[in-house]
Amino acid sequence: MKTKISYILLVIFILFVIAGVSLGEINKVLETAVNLCYGCIGIG
Amino acid sequence: MWRRVSQAFSAAVINSHWPSLFARTIYGGRLKGFCVPGLNCYSCPLAIFACPVGSIQYILAHVRPSIEAGKYYLGFYVIGTLGIVGSAVGRMACGWICPFGALQDVLYKIPTRKIEIPRAFNYFKYAVLLVMVVILPAMVLEEFGYGEVWFCKYLCPAGTLEAGIPLTALNPSLRSQVGTQFWLKAFILVVFLGLMIPVRRPFCRTTCPLGAIYSLFNRVSILRLSVSSECITCDRCYKICPMSIKVYENPNSRDCIRCLDCVKVCPVNAVSYEIAGRRLGSSEPF
């Protein structure tokens, strides 16, 4: 039963990634990560 | 042995953009669009991937303007990435990949009197996840509708260690902007570094929001641990466990980082790991 749940979850999250990529979220993450995060450094 | 190799290899690969160090900036290539499964600040000069905790906060902090612009960035990509890792191996990334986890393992090896922290503290990480990573970035908005990355800004010691200290050391213009917020974060880092010597993985156990997310999958992931009736409750698994778990009481505890050290030390091979319900190992993991 638990194994079935794991595979169902895996499929759901793969669909999440596909949805995110098709919405363009990968570019949003890229845009976030390539700019210096002043908050992370502790000065923003 | 294999876990140490994996931790060292992951830390080296995740932080492999040495030219940025000499240019006193951060890497800006396409790889930064992918989230690493561990806690590794994307503002670290060496980092080549994105931090999932920073990314999800940023997306939530910009969720209102994105909806108003008809873009609907709701975090599916980051949540999906974490969900895939979690439903496959639970918290294993904490034990085998996360560079900040590896640092804690190394510092705990310094010989000194070791102490245990109360188990109740382990629940604090869920509050950190809910309040600092989800609620505050999405709900506390400035006049144009943008939120802030609260966990990164006010708490994350990995960001201070990997990004704050090297970038301010390398860059005089950033150094001139150092103020109270930087010193508050530096103090938090020093407290955790101090705790890492006598306490096993204090940050992972009490505060890490990424560990909190993965921990929700431990009971239902494809990779799970099991303990057979041959167990003699000798406590060797408990003594070696970096998360101080009595494996025979709860082999798939939410705190288990799947380091598999318990599998290795069990004298009667009672602890084993199974993939999709099939028992695969009981003595030499992988």
Image (cartoon, rainbow, N blue to C red):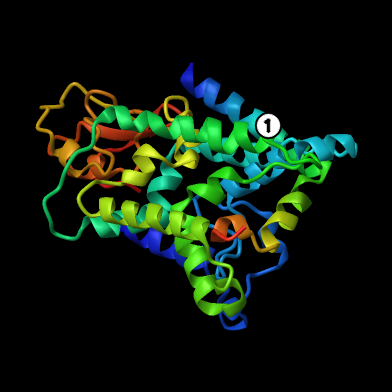
The reply to whether residue B52 is in sight is yes
Which residue extends farthest front?
B180
Chain of residue at mark 1 = B
Question: How many C-alpha atoms fall within 10 Å of the one at disc 1: few (<14), some, or many (≥20)?
Answer: some
Mark 1: secondary structure: helix
Question: How far across and down, in percent of the image, does residue B273 sit?
Answer: 34, 35
**Looking at the image, which is closer to me, A1 or B200?**
B200
Q: Quadrant of the N terminus of chain B?
A: bottom left
- Position of residue B118 relative to residue B30, above or below, is above
Question: How far across and down, in percent of the image, does residue B48 sit?
Answer: 60, 65
- Position of residue B11 relative to residue A22, above or below, is below
Question: How far across and down, in percent of the image, does residue A25 sit?
Answer: 76, 45
- Position of residue B113 relative to residue B32, above or below, is above
* Residue B232 found in image quarter: top left
Q: Is residue B116 left or right of residue B4?
A: left
Which residue extends farthest top?
A1
- Residue located 70% across and 62% down the image: A35
- Residue located 71% across and 36% down the image: B76
**Looking at the image, which is closer to me, B149 or B93?**
B149
The residue type indicated by label 1 comes to: Met
- Position of residue B250 relative to residue B15, above or below, is above
Question: How far across and down, in percent of the image, does residue B280 sit?
Answer: 35, 37
**Looking at the image, which is closer to me, B178 or B146?**
B178
The reply to whether residue B215 is in sight is no
How many callouts does the rendering have?
1
**Looking at the image, which is closer to me, B90 or B181?**
B181
Residue hosting label 1 = B139
Q: Is residue B167 left or right of residue B138?
A: left
- Residue located 38% across and 28% down the image: B123
Q: Is residue B257 left or right of residue B159?
A: left
Q: Is residue B200 left or right of residue B225?
A: left
